Structure formats: structure tokens, C-alpha cells
Amino acid sequence: MDTIAANAIADTIDFVRSKSRPRADRELDRASEDPHVIADIGRLTFRLHAAQALTERAGRAIDAAVADPNEATVTAAQIATAEAKIATTEIAIDASNSCSNLLARRHAGGAQS
């Protein structure tokens, strides 16, 4: 699924591998070796996959509501869609912010707040 979040995560990974410096207080050669950076990208990727799964589930719920429109199926589709919308919006914002934070840190000389 090619989304804002997926693209932001891919850009972040590329940036960390090719341009980002490690924090000054870390004895690392590259930022991509920093366990905190690895964990942060892992958490973003996990949340992206969760949002993708919720989106697929919402699609199945919508299909079920279209095939058999009744109060239960329509309500289930509405709830599943809302859950997917929340998850996809939050991961898109957080993934974009993560990339922006790394860019800001790079321009600030590798310092971390």
C-alpha cells in the first residue's frame, strides 16, 4: 500500500542510512546503528502495518454491508471505517513528523533534544 505514511517511513529510512549523523553522545559511526532510531522506525512500521490491516478490515466490512445492508452490517462498517481513518491519519502524521525531526536534527548538527 503506497501511502503518505509508507512513503514517509521509506524516506526516513533512506535519510537515516544515507545522511543522518548519530547523536553526539553516542559512540556510533552512523545514525542507522542507533538502537533508539531502529526502535522508533520499527514502531512506526508496526503502526503502519496495523493501520493497513484496519483499512483492509474496513473494506471487508463495507463489502459485507453492501451485500447485506442491515443495521448490524452498516454499523460494523461505520465503526471499522472510523477506526481505520484514525489509525491511518495518526500514522501519517507521526511518520511525517519523524522524518521532519530527523531533518531538523541533521541541520542542527546532529544534536537531539
Image: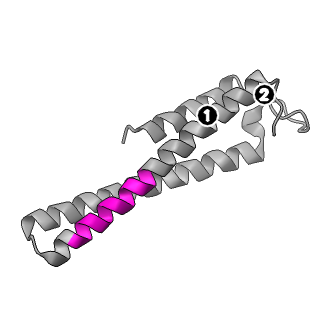
Foreground residue, 84 or 17?
Answer: 84
- In the figure, is residue 74 to the left or right of 104? left
Is the residue 103 above or below the residue 78 in the image?
Answer: above
Name the main secondary structure of what is drawn in magenta: helix
User: Which residue bears the numbered disc 2?
Assistant: 21
Mark 1 Cα shell of 10 Å, populated few (<14), some (14-19), many (≥20): many
Q: Is residue 85 magenta?
A: yes
Mark 2 touching mark 1, by CB under 8 A? no
User: Which residue bears the numbered disc 1?
Assistant: 99
Number of numbered discs present?
2
Is the residue 97 above or below the residue 69 in the image?
Answer: above
Foreground residue, 97 or 54?
Answer: 97
Q: Is residue 100 magenta?
A: no
SS of the residue at dot 2?
Answer: loop
Foreground residue, 92 or 27?
Answer: 92
- Place residue 12 in its image quadrant: top right
- In the figure, is residue 104 to the left or right of 72? right
Nearer-N-terminus badge (2/1):
2
Is the residue 90 above or below the residue 14 in the image?
Answer: below
SS of the residue at dot 1?
Answer: helix
Residue at 61 percent across and 34 percent down: it is 99
Residue at 67 percent across and 35 percent down: it is 101
- Place residue 28 in its image quadrant: top right
Residue at 79 percent across and 24 percent down: it is 108
Name the spot of residue 24 as percent of width and height, x first.
89, 33
Which colour assignment does the render follow? one colour
What type is the residue that disc 2 sits on? Arg
- Place residue 106 in its image quadrant: top right
In which quadrant will I find the C terminus? top right
Highlighted range, magenta:
75-88
Disc 2/disc 1 C-alpha distance (Å): 14 Å
What type is the residue that disc 1 sits on? Cys
